[in-house]
Amino acid sequence: MFVSRGHDEVRTVVVTRGGLAALAAVAGVVLLFASALVFTVVRARVAPEIMAPAGAGAQLVAELNALEGKLATLDGQMSVLLKRNEELRIMADLPKIPVEVAAVGVGGPGHEETAGLLAGGPVERRLAAAESDLDVLLRRSGLVASSMRHAEQIIRGKTDRWGATPSILPTDGFLSSPFSFARKHPLLGTFRPHYGVDISARAGNKVLATADGRVTVAGWSSGSGNHVEIDHGYGIRTLYSHNAKLLVRTGELVRRGEPIGLVGSTGVSVGPHVHYEVHEQGQPVDPMKFIFPDVAAD
Ligand SMILES: [Zn+2]
């Protein structure tokens, strides 16, 4: 579902938000269409009594033919929706919709039997059958619409969560110092925790946002030099220190892979590198645990 290529990461989400919205809209249209057909049936049932007997039968048959044609079309569209709904449910890791919901079709074996039980002539029976088909379609369209909404919510939650995961290295370089709770400081010589990783890289290399988020700090401090902090939501924040130059401002929204600064050695630093931190619920964690080397899960 997701593809990333190192720092030039490309994210492919098979189901776009627009696509989901379109599907929900299609389900809504089918529901409306089915409702409209109900009125046609009711009108057709009433028609014989309010019209002159001569010619009424022929008109009713013509309306019935049209109605049955529309029902067949609607049934075809419903099958497409059911199939798409099933795919969405697989992506959302939801169980299959109950077989009785998916399997009940229009004009199946049960259809003739039900229609045959009803009194009346052939036209009456066809009307009754059309009515029962409509009931089935209405029920199914309602179920499919709610099932799709459920799957959509879950998929959206997953893609948002993925977007907030700092899954790439912040620059093209190499790990020169790992995350540690007690490391000998390269300049100060004392043992102090190192709440991030150092990625050494050529001065001037781009420093990239490692996930989607909002810049909460883009400023200067004597220790961190030019630094950027990004809030990714879900309690996740990232920090990028020692930049030569910053390319974003506080409050800006950034996407994963977007340049936010240039590698430098500002603040307390021995050479060009990015000191990169990830905080989860306010606690510093090893950034490497989030990073997908080159290719993420498909
Ligand atoms: Zn560092």
Image (cartoon, helix red, strand yellow):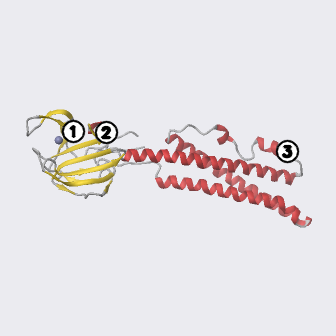
* Label 1 element class: loop
N-terminal label among 2 and 3: 3
Which percent across, then down, holds residue 44? 81, 60
The residue beneath circle 3 is 116
Up the image or down, 12 lies above or below 285; here it is below
- Residue type beneath disc 2: Phe
The quadrant the C terminus occupies is top left
- Residue furthest to the right in view is 53
- Residue type beneath disc 1: Tyr
Q: Is residue 208 visible?
A: no
The residue beneath circle 1 is 195
Residue ID at (29%, 47%):
210
* Depth order, front residue of 67/286: 286
**Is 85 left or right of 132, judged from the image as shown?**
left
The quadrant the N terminus occupies is top left
Question: How far apart are labels 1 and 2 at the CA level?
Answer: 15 Å
* Label 3 element class: helix
- Residue furthest to the front in view is 282
Question: How far apart are labels 2 and 3 at the CA level?
Answer: 64 Å
The residue beneath circle 2 is 290
* Label 2 element class: loop
Dot 2 and dot 3 residues touching (CB under 8 Å):
no
